[in-house]
Image (spheres, grey):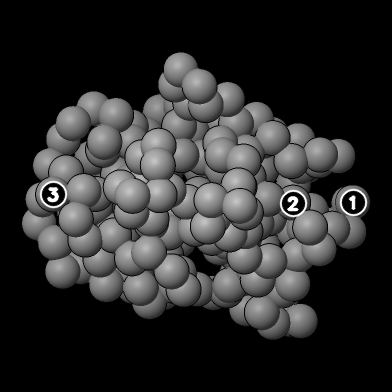
Amino acid sequence: MKLIPESRFLKDYLQETDIIDCSHPSIINAGRKLFGQGQSDLEKSKTAFEFVRDCIHHSWDIQHTRVTCMASDVLKWKEGICYAKSHLLAALLRSQGIPAGFCYQRLMLFDTPEKGYCLHALNAIFIRQLHKWIRLDARGNKKGIDAQFSTDREILAFSVHDRLGEKDYPVIYSHPHPNTVNALLKNDDALNMYLHHLPSDI
C-alpha cells in the first residue's frame, strides 16, 4: 500500500501538542535512558518501538480500567490502548527529532463482523537515511500477534481482511485523529470503552 502523508512538511510531524508532549521531563528522561550517543535515527526508532511495544501494557491485555491519553501519562502508568501507545511512541521519536505520524486501520473488534468494528492506531515514521516512511505497530505482542520492526516489509499486528469490511487507511496524519482522542477523553473505564465506545471508522 502506498502511504500518503497528510502534510508534505516533515516539521508537521515533529510538532509538540498537549497530547504529544514530547518536551515533558519524563519523556526527555526516558530518551536519555533509551538512546545512546551516536545512535542513528533508524536505531533510535527501533529502540523506541520495542520499548513501547514491550514495556507499555495494552489495557485490554492486562484488563485494567485506567484510561491514558497524554504521552507522558502513558509513560507514567505504563499502560494504554493502541491509541495511547501510538501517542507515546510519537512523543519519544519527536523528542529526538524523528518525524512520526499516525495511521489507522478499521478492524473487527473481535472475531466476526457481527461483533462490531473499531479503529486501530499505529505509527508511521520517516527514516531519513532511507528517505521513506515505514509503518510500525506498537500495540503489544501476544499469542497470535507478532509485530516487528522492519524497513523492507511491514510486519504489523493485524492483517486487514477487505472482504469482512476491514480497511487499511493510507493517510499518515500529523496529529492523532479526533475520533480516537475523543474516545480517550470522554471515557473513564478502559475496558468499557474498549467494548462499547471505540470509534468504528474515520
Image position of 146 (left or right of 135): left
Residue 155 occupies quadrant: top right
Nearer to us of marks 1 and 2 is 2
Image position of 49 (left or right of 197): right
Q: Amino acid at mark 3?
A: Asn
**How far across and down, in percent of the image, does residue 117 sit?**
38, 55
Q: Give the CA separation, mark 2 to mark 3.
A: 32 Å
Query: Could you tell me which secondary element the residue under label 2 belongs to?
Result: strand
Rendered position, 53 above or below 108: above
Query: Could you tell me which secondary element the residue under label 3 belongs to?
Result: helix
Residue topped by disc 3: 192
Q: Residues within 10 Å of mark 1 (few under 14, many from 20)?
A: few
Residue 136 occupies quadrant: top right
User: Looking at the image, can residue 182 be seen?
Assistant: yes
Residue topped by disc 2: 134
Q: Pointers 1 and 2 in contact (CB under 8 A)?
A: yes
Sooner in the amino-acid sequence: mark 3 or mark 1: 1
Q: Give the CA separation, mark 3 to mark 1.
A: 41 Å
Nearer to us of marks 3 and 1 is 3
**How far across and down, in percent of the image, does residue 135 sit?**
68, 50
Q: Give the residue drawn at x 86%, y 39%.
A: 152
Counting every numbered tag in the picture gives 3
User: Looking at the image, can residue 121 be seen?
Assistant: no
Residue topped by disc 1: 130
Q: Give the residue drawn at x 46%, y 73%.
A: 202
Sooner in the amino-acid sequence: mark 2 or mark 3: 2
Q: Give the CA separation, mark 1 to mark 2.
A: 10 Å
